[in-house]
Image: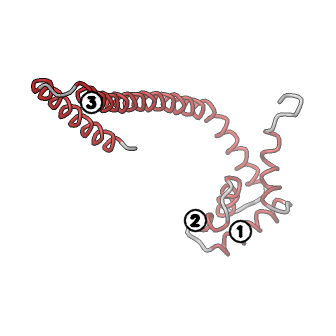
Amino acid sequence: MNQRERFVIIGILLIVTILVGFDLYTDSREGVILWHVLFEGFIGLVALSGIFYLLRGTIDLRHRLQQEIEEFSTFKHEAERWRADSRKYVDGLALAIDQQLTKWKLTISEKEVAFLLLKGLSLKEIADVRKTTEKTARVQSMAVYAKAGISGRSELSAYFLEDLLLPSSQV
């Protein structure tokens, strides 16, 4: 139930509670039978309980939402801090990869394709990013593999990333 629906129901229950209260007042002045007054009083209490239940749910929901926002904010700050702390390593890795790609005598276009392959983009995505055809991306990726002396994307990734994994004794 969304916030607006909650407030509509609270409004309706509030009107019911007020009308029942007014009816109880007039009934008590007219000397109506006790069971009738008690029954209407019970109905008023049920409506009032519904109001408190919905208000409590709304307050709890807002409290949980605030907690989620705070947790997300903490997570976001931690991610930004990690990104900033690891930036020098990422830059160093990118430079080392670029140097190896230069040793393999890749063209600038082939280097771009190699980096996009390492990022995990599909050939279609590479073509879209580079504003070329998928066939061009495929030909350039095959040139990268041939010049590097490897058979495909997984070997390309393993060439650069395999040493990043900790040995099983350190995990």
Q: Position of residue 68 (x, y in %)?
A: 48, 31
Q: Classify mark 1: helix, strand or loop.
A: helix
Q: Quadrant of residue 93?
A: top right
Q: Classify mark 3: helix, strand or loop.
A: helix
Q: Quadrant of residue 45?
A: top left
Q: Position of residue 53 (x, y in %)?
A: 37, 30
Q: How many labels sit on residues?
A: 3
Disc 3 residue type (three-letter): Gly
The residue under the point 14% across, 24% down is 28
For disc 1, the marked residue is: 140
The residue under the point 56% across, 29% down is 78
For disc 2, the marked residue is: 130
Q: Position of residue 139 (x, y in %)?
A: 72, 72
Q: Quadrant of residue 92?
A: top right
The residue under the point 59% across, 71% down is 132
Q: In whole angstroms, how far apart are the C-alphas of marks 3 and 2?
A: 69 Å
Q: Classify mark 2: helix, strand or loop.
A: helix
- The answer to which of 67 and 76 lies nearer the viewer is 67
Disc 2 residue type (three-letter): Arg
